[in-house]
Image (cartoon, rainbow, N blue to C red):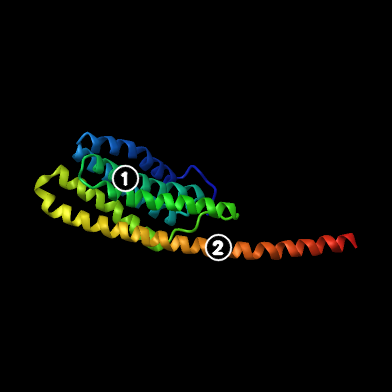
Amino acid sequence: MSDRILTVPNALSALRILLVPVFLVLVLIGEDVAALIVIVVSSVSDFLDGIIARRFGQITRLGQLLDPAADRLFIFAAVIALAVREVVPWWIVAVIVGRDVLLAGLGIVLARHGYGPLPVHHLGKVATFALFYALPLLVLGQAFPMLQPYSDPLGWAFTLWGAFLYWWAGILYVRQTRAVTARAREEAPAASDTLGVQRRSMDD
């Protein structure tokens, strides 16, 4: 783990973030084929930045923030654009966005107790993977209507399963946050007692 900023994986993650508004606009205006090309480029760069980071020892703190941020932004862009076009219902947007609002709240609670973000759970990674590839399948059906009978069922299966796992991982994060903050509250009085003893010893 390093504090480097200028690395190839970080550049690829930054590129993916820059492609998010391009993808959003293309879906909104109905340029579905171009949107699919963008999402393919993003997926390939996502695959490459992980391989390069591990193979060449370029895992950085910045990269650990940029990579999941790019995934989430692409998911948000796709689900909101598809909801505007009435391809998916708005309750899907509420389910997906609501879970990340929950995690933002947990982050605030952890920060107040002196902790950083919790490590990414494997279940959360699986959920993000499912959603990251589910929504483009729905875009594929819009771009090529002849494929819609095949792409839509698969896309909806990934979407619903991903949303379920997304919230399951969210519940696990809630439990971990409760455990961490409870331990912090237990340790605080002990630390205060120790400090008090040290001060009395110095006074004596």
What amino acid type is highlighted by mark number 2? Val
Residue 119 is situated, as x and y percent measured from the top left of the image, at 48, 59
Cα distance in 3D space between marks 2 and 1: 35 Å
Mark 2 residue element? helix
What amino acid type is highlighted by mark number 1? Ser
Q: Quadrant of the C terminus?
A: bottom right
Q: Report which residue position mark 2 lands on.
A: 180
Residue sitting at x 29%, y 38%: 24
Vertical relation: 97 (above or below) 169: above
Q: Earlier in the sequence, mark 2 or mark 1?
A: 1
Q: Residues within 10 Å of mark 2 (few under 14, many from 20)?
A: some
> In the figure, is residue 46 to the left or right of 115?
left
The mark found on residue 42 in the picture is 1
Q: Do the residues under discs 2 and 1 have CB atoms within 8 angstroms?
A: no
Residue sitting at x 22%, y 33%: 29
Instruction: Point out the residue furthest to the left here.
Output: 146
